[in-house]
Structure formats: structure tokens, C-alpha cells
Image (cartoon, rainbow, N blue to C red):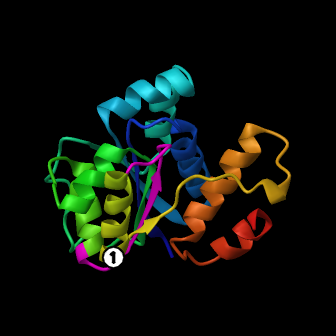
Amino acid sequence: MVRRVIVALTGASGAALGVRVVERLLARGDVETHLVISSAAEHTLRHEVGEGTVERLCAGAAVVHPAENIGATIASGSFRVAGMIVAPCSMRTLAAIASGITDNLITRSADVQLKERRRLVLLARETPLHLGHLRNMVAVTEMGAVVMPPVPAFYQLPQSVADIVDHLAARAIDLLDLPGEAEAAAWAG
């Protein structure tokens, strides 16, 4: 059974996290990936991951939705999905979700996940955090989202940054509770 998953990338640092989430979902073979990349994320992807990354991600995804198209299928509650991962999730995006501001497809789709009681995983990327960030994290958590700051699991004894990124991507996907993912992520702790 093919399940739909929305993956959104915002402009926060940590673009490799979103790339690895998409790669892991594509490798499963049973997930229809709907991809949204903000214009800030395009810039960050080129800077942090390299030229051609945006094109490679778009070529792999089942559907690529322009971030400004708030009328896309994924902006409707009647379009069934298994959940959504925002990786990385900028503090601007987190604040918009917490406030119910749906001015682009990423925040609109996140809002739909919350209202439909579907999984929404936010890999919030910022440090240190001020009280506004923390309050926004509490607000989205109270609404049903899972805030997952990408904190490395050093007990796994990672040998590289790629190991850390892969572990975090596996953990984020595991939070969607897709069939078979728990086994795939079991090594990740």
C-alpha cells in the first residue's frame, strides 16, 4: 500500500536533514513523496549541500508543489496523507504554524495536518532558543505537532556527520508511524 507523505524544507540551516528524509522515503518504495521547498530553502540547499541538489530532490519526488501554491492538493484535508515532516523547520515557519498563519503552502499544509489530527513532525533548527521560540514550540505541541530538534544521539557513536544526519532522518520518519519504519529505524535508537 502506497502512503503519501509531505516533506517540506525551509530556509533554516540543516538542509541535509530534509535531503536525507526525502532519500530515505524514496528508498522505501511504498511512499508517495509530496515535496515543498521554500525559496529560502533553495538557497540554503545550494550553499550547504551543493549545486544540483534542488533539481535532484525534485526529480525524485512523486509530486513537487510550488511553495506559493496554497491551492495545491496537499492544502486540503480531503487529500489523505500519512503525515508531514518539516526538515529543517525555521523559527519563522514554526511561529507561523503556532499562530495559524497560512500564507504559503508549507504553513497551510502544516495547518491542515493539525486540524485533521495527522502527524506533523517539525525539526526545529535554532540555538540558543529565546522565550518566543519556546512558547511557539509549546503552542504547536499543544495543537498536536511533534517538535523534534535535530539533537545528535552521541550514544550511537557516529563516525561522521552523515551518520548523524541519517539517524535524525530515520527518527523523524519513525515518528510518522509508517508500517515497517520502526524496524528500519531500530538501529538508530
Tell me residue 49's x, y (percent).
57, 28
- Residue 33 lies, in percent from the top left, at 44, 56
Please name the residue shown 64% across and 60% down the image: 170
Horizontally, residue 163 falls left or right of residue 43, namely: right
Please name whichever residue, 96 or 22, is drawn nearer the observer in this view of the structure: 96
- Quadrant of the rendered structure where residue 153 is? bottom right
- Asked whether residue 74 is in view, the answer is no
Residue drawn at (21%, 72%) of the image: 77
Name the quadrant containing residue 92: top left
User: How busy is the neighbourhood of tag 1: few (under 14 within 10 Å), some, or many (20 plus)?
Assistant: few
Between 77 and 97, the one lying in front of the other is 97
Give 25 or 119, whichever is nearer the viewer. 119
Amino acid bearing label 1: Glu
> Helix, strand or loop at disc 1?
helix
Q: Please say whether residue 137 is visible from this viewpoint.
A: yes
**48 in relation to 154, above or below:** above
Question: Does 142 sit above or below residue 98?
Answer: below
| Residue at (20% x, 54% y) in the render | 72
- Is residue 127 in the magenta section? yes
Residue drawn at the location 80% of the way across and 66% of the way down: 187
In this picture, which residue range is highlighted in magenta?
Answer: 115-130
**Residue placed under numbered mark 1 in the picture:** 142
Q: Quadrant of the C terminus?
A: bottom right
